[in-house]
Image: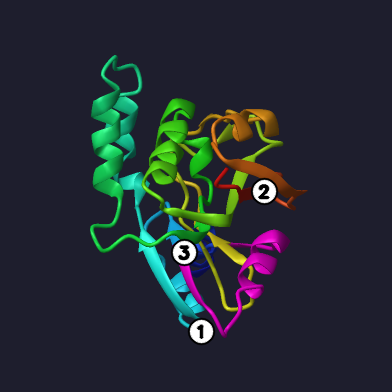
Amino acid sequence: MLASAALDRAELSPAVLRAPLFSELIAGLSEEQRHVVLDLGPARAGLIERLGLLRCRLDILDLPRSLARLLELQNSDDEDDQLAVLVDCLPSTTPEPAGVVLCWDLLDYLPLPVTLRLFDLLRERDRLAPGARLHALVEYAAPSMPGSPRRVGPNLDGDLLIDADHGSPRPSPRHSLGTLVKHLPGFQSERSMLLANGMQEYLFRFSAS
């Protein structure tokens, strides 16, 4: 019984993933400057704790909370419906252009037209600073992935903690780099790296022009 309970806890414990590009991105944020970070996912204690070491504003979009509605509307002829959902996700506080955008694994779950619409919206509303960098994890090796986005967040060492998979598996879109760039208007690929868990880690850079 004790062995079974210990195994259950181990299965529920977050996996630790070394993500060099994420670590370099956060480590490169100067302590002397103020930074604005746009997080497409929900609030994570680890990220708040890590960024708390810096002069930083963190804006949370929590797109997973609206994902079901966005999926319902993906075949809608009325693009205004999707746009309204995305606008509701934007923080209601005074907007500031973000220098860092954190996508985690959400690019695998958002329909590509929604991704395009979201980043068009961010660009049109001046929510992206010139030279802003975008970090993303994309399923690359595995043909399937968890049915829902995983909670991902850093520890103080700069590694990522990924919650145990949940939801019935679904096919991985396994987006190519060209597909991602096409649906991230204004962003160009900067670096990429294949991680130990088979995911591809990406850094993109934004050009306002």
Q: Which residue is drawn at 46% across and 55% down?
A: 151
Image coords of residue 41 (percent x, y): 41, 53
Give the quarter of the image for residue 176.
top right
Front residue (pair 57, 145): 57
Q: Which amino acid does label 3 sit on?
A: Val
N-term-proximal mark, 3 vs 2: 3
Q: Residue 70 carries which label?
A: none
Helix, strand or loop at mark 3: strand
In the image, the segment drawn in magenta is 15-37
Q: Nearer the viewer, mark 1 or mark 3?
A: 3
Q: Are marks 2 and 1 in contact (CB under 8 Å)?
A: no
Q: Is residue 187 visible?
A: yes
Mark 2 surroundings within 10 Å by alpha-carbon count, few (fewer than 14), some (14 through 19), many (20 or more)? many
Circle 1 is placed at which residue position?
53
Q: Which amino acid does label 2 sit on?
A: Tyr
Q: Which of marks 3 and 2 is in front?
A: 3
Quarter of the picture holding the C terminus: top right
Helix, strand or loop at mark 2: strand
Q: What residue type is labelled 1?
A: Leu
Give the Cα separation between the discs numbered 1 and 3.
Answer: 14 Å
Front residue (pair 137, 55): 55
Q: Does the magenta stretch include residue 172?
A: no
Image coords of residue 208 (percent x, y): 55, 47
Q: Which residue is drawn at 56% across and 55% down?
A: 130
Q: Residue 37 carries which label?
A: 3
Mark 1 surroundings within 10 Å by alpha-carbon count, few (fewer than 14), some (14 through 19), many (20 or more)? few
N-term-proximal mark, 1 vs 3: 3
Horizontal arrangement in the rendering, residue 87 relative to residue 10 (left or right) = left
Q: Eyeballing the image, is 70 above or below 125?
A: above
Give the Cα separation between the discs numbered 2 and 1.
Answer: 24 Å
Circle 2 is placed at which residue position?
202
Q: Are marks 1 and 3 in contact (CB under 8 Å)?
A: no
